[in-house]
Image (tube, grey):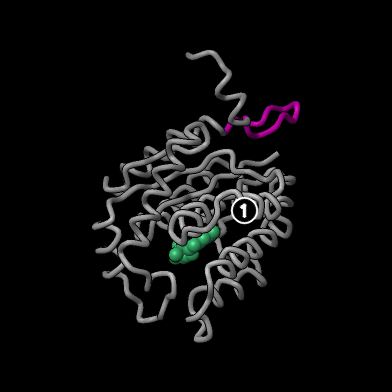
Amino acid sequence: MGLFVSFEGTEGSGKSTQLALLAKRVADHGHEVISLREPGGTPIGEEIRHLLKHSAANAGMCPETELLLMNASRAQLVREVIRPALAEGKAVLCDRFFDSTLAYQVFGRCLDGTLAQRIIDYAIGDTLPDLTLLLRVPLEVSEARRAGRNSGVRDRMEEENRAFFLRVEQGYDAIASNTATRVRTIDATQTVEQVAEEIWKWVAPLITVPTAQGDRAWKTVGEYRNEAPG
Ligand code: TMP
């Protein structure tokens, strides 16, 4: 059984940088790591990603289509990559997973939460992250970082107004408070090194050294939580 960690947060929260740092650190501990992003991560998912973000034809995309496309990409990623990798004992690190749908489509686009959850459930089945790292920065920081990294490539999601991103922030607040045991919230206004150390504090205990008897290489979050302190 492998380890599945998702990264969440608004644009410019440093997810990609931290994911790359964590991937290196986990690999340095002798584990095979797969780094993914959503939407995307498979040939089909990357085409869906283009459609959602950059395609010249996407200006009139309605929120319902957006919800379904995000989850179409997710359904493919789960079956084509994540499940096989976990079955082989690999560590899967994913830049965004289903919490993004709750933050962006349910809170941001004001779609029905119960319906969205059913669509998410259909896409992921029982494939849930062991740990979700939620990197938080204030909206102003996110806006400044987004403006600063403007690549010149049009991005439909990033064209949204401030009210939309405020609702997305509120969505992440709700996620952090509802599922506190899976989701660990990290102050991403700290330095890159400080954030990386905090992330490692959560991930390191999930990694155990495989024994000669061929035990699993990972503890489940449940096992870790149930252990006596010390
Ligand atoms: P990013 O990879 O640069 O973060 O771009 C992905 C964009 O897609 C970002 O604006 C968040 C958005 N998104 C959703 O709206 N819903 C989702 O379920 C996912 C995975 C991403």
Magenta residues (range)? 207-219
SS type, badge 1: helix
The residue that disc 1 covers is: 115
Q: Is residue 195 above or below residue 226?
A: below
Q: Residue farthest to the bottom? A: 56
- Of the 4 image quadrants, the one containing the N terminus is top right
Q: How crowded is mark 1: few (under 14 residues within 10 Å), some or many (20 or more)?
A: few
Give residue 221's position: percent from left, percent from top.
Answer: 58, 30
Which one is nearer the viewer's eye here, 125 or 215?
125
Q: In this view, does 38 lie above or below 180?
A: below
Task: Tell whether 7 sits left or right of 115.
Answer: left
Give residue 197's position: percent from left, percent from top.
Answer: 37, 39
Which one is nearer the viewer's eye here, 96 or 16?
96
Amino acid at dot 1: Leu
Does the segment drawn in magenta span residue 214?
yes
Residue at image coords 66%, 60%: 77
Does the segment drawn in magenta span residue 55?
no
Residue at image coords 48%, 36%: 178
Which one is nearer the viewer's eye here, 52 or 185?
52
Residue at image coords 47%, 81%: 59
Which one is nearer the viewer's eye here, 79 or 195?
79
Q: In this view, does 177 lie above or below 27?
A: above
Q: Could you say which quadrant of the image residue 43 lies in?
A: bottom right
Provide the major secondary structure of the magenta segment. loop
